[in-house]
Amino acid sequence: MIRREVSLSYELAPGWLAPHVDGLLQGRAVARGCGTCGRVSFPPERHCGCAAPAPHWITLEGWAEVVFRTDGLDGSFALVSFAGSSTKSVVRLVLDSATGRFGTLVAPTDGQPALLLALNGKGASDDTH
Amino acid sequence: MSVIATITGAALTRFDHRRDGSSFRDWAGDAFEAALAMSGLDRDEIGALVVASESDFFTFQLNPATVIAGDLGLTGVSALRVEGGGASGQLAVHAGARIVATGQARHVAVVGVDPSASTLPGSTVKMLYGMSFDQWSDGMTGTTSTALYALSVQSFLARTGIGVWALDAVTMANRANACANPGAHLPRRHGAAEIASSPMIAAPYRRLHCSPLSDGAAALILSYPGAVPEARRGAAGIVGTGAATDKFHLGARADLGRFAAKTLAMQRACAIAAITPSDVGLAEVYDAYAGAQLQALEALGLSEQIGADLEAGRFAPSGALPVNLSGGLLGQGAPVGATGVGQTATCALALEGRYHAGLQPRELPRYALADTHGGVCTTAAVTLLQAGAEA
Ligand SMILES: [Zn+2]
């Protein structure tokens, strides 16, 4: 057998996603809104799909409700609905053992931008905000 | 409807984890030589080569189409490589059909190949597959293919009321079919208890509900219908192709459990073929995960009561609509670039009545469907085949 080892170190420019990526690093949910059709996407979509997009950035409150959750050897992930967003989002649950339907976007501790949700361990929305 | 391209040659290598020192270039050669022999054509009659390979990370070879062209003794032909994630192979079939349809070549070789099992550690492939999804959101979240499929199937099961039992049923059926396929990676007769005791990867998906990483290749020779050799006049033909994309963020879809791109692709293919989904009598369906097969059957319009049809054996080899006779990705295996090419090859062989004994339907269907997708059905590609007039 021929053994080859490669180490790749990328410098990835965030481009138009820069406000979103910067927000994630600070634990803020920066979404893309359209002034024409009103669609708010998080994660942001570059094109909202309407005929005359008027995109701008909106900072959401940052809390979300879990719609579906999956746990296993791959980790804990969920499809959640962030308050103020027209789209849902896939997040990694940072407190794998926590239960509850609501959580808050949190900043990464390793400097890598990611959609991380900390569940609050409670089960009703009026407990969270 | 008219035949876009006749499938004069179709072949697959075995799909498995190779530990015999052979390389993807060997498998590509083996599949191509078998398909060429079946076609009865001479090598110098092949005017173009389309190679499907998902990632240079697997092959360690950029520009693989030129290298494979040389290996196959085809230097000089027009060669390109097609990539569309898991759909790479089927998109390559479409590219080959277009080359024939536009008269750029009378005979085209389509070769799908990937060393998905043997060249990299499984953990590395898992990380790479995570990059199949939006690397700027889901990818950075560290999600896995299995986790995204799990969220999608949860939505599907919740909407349809189909129970988790159906995931086990698909897994058992496809791996049982694979027992009669000598080229299959995972011929198994699972019991429900065995599945239930396999590790939970991302609920509801346990390890046995997931397709394996495989090595292998598949090849087709696509011919202009007016240039088919006399001996191959009974060959099956491609009568429709369709492809479509969906929003790559699962959460941006109106219904994350619905494979909308597959529906669009199927509608486009059916429009070209001038048939409806109910005309399909055999289907090779993209079952990267057990539930994805159920979601595909819904999206393709092949069943309106999936749970009941599954229980009644409608999709079994002896059923009215055999699905994944080959074993599918779950049973036959998944060398990504080879997957879509292999599905189409399987359909062509079955329509000619020359598929593996024990799996070959006694009554030849008129139409067959090969269905492939990439991502969580982020990009879909389907091909409709029609039996030859003399089959
Ligand atoms: Zn808009």
Image (cartoon, coloured by chain):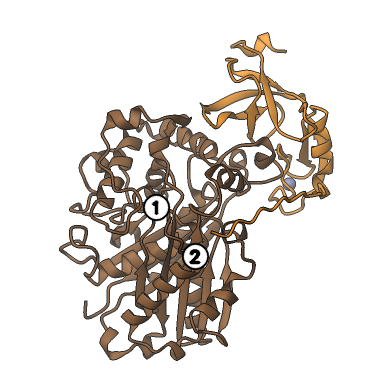
**Eyeballing the image, is B347 above or below B207?**
below
In the image, residue B373 lies at what x, y percent?
49, 54
Residue B111, image x, y percentages: 47, 71
Q: Secondary structure at mark 1?
A: loop
Q: Give the distance between the C-alpha atoms of the residues marked 1 and 2, in whole angstroms.
A: 15 Å
As drawn, the chain in brown is B
Disc 2 marks which residue? B24
Could you tell me the amino acid type at mark 2? Phe
Q: Is residue B25 left or right of residue B41?
A: right
Q: Residues within 10 Å of mark 2 (few under 14, many from 20)?
A: many
In which quadrant is the C terminus of chain A drawn? top right
Q: Are marks 1 and 2 on the same chain?
A: yes
Query: Mark 1 belongs to which amino acid?
Result: Gly
Residue B133 in the image: state x and y as whole percent: 62, 46
| Residue in the image at 77% along x and 49% along y | A9
Residue in the foreground of this view, choosing between B348 and B247: B348
According to the picture, the residue beneath numbered tag 1 turns out to be: B333
User: Image quarter for residue B81?
Assistant: bottom right
Q: Earlier in the sequence, mark 1 or mark 2?
A: 2
Q: Is residue B4 visible?
A: no
Looking at the rendering, which quadrant does residue A107 occupy?
A: top right
Q: Is mark 1 within 8 Å of ligand 1?
A: no
Up/down of B353 relative to B2, above or below: above
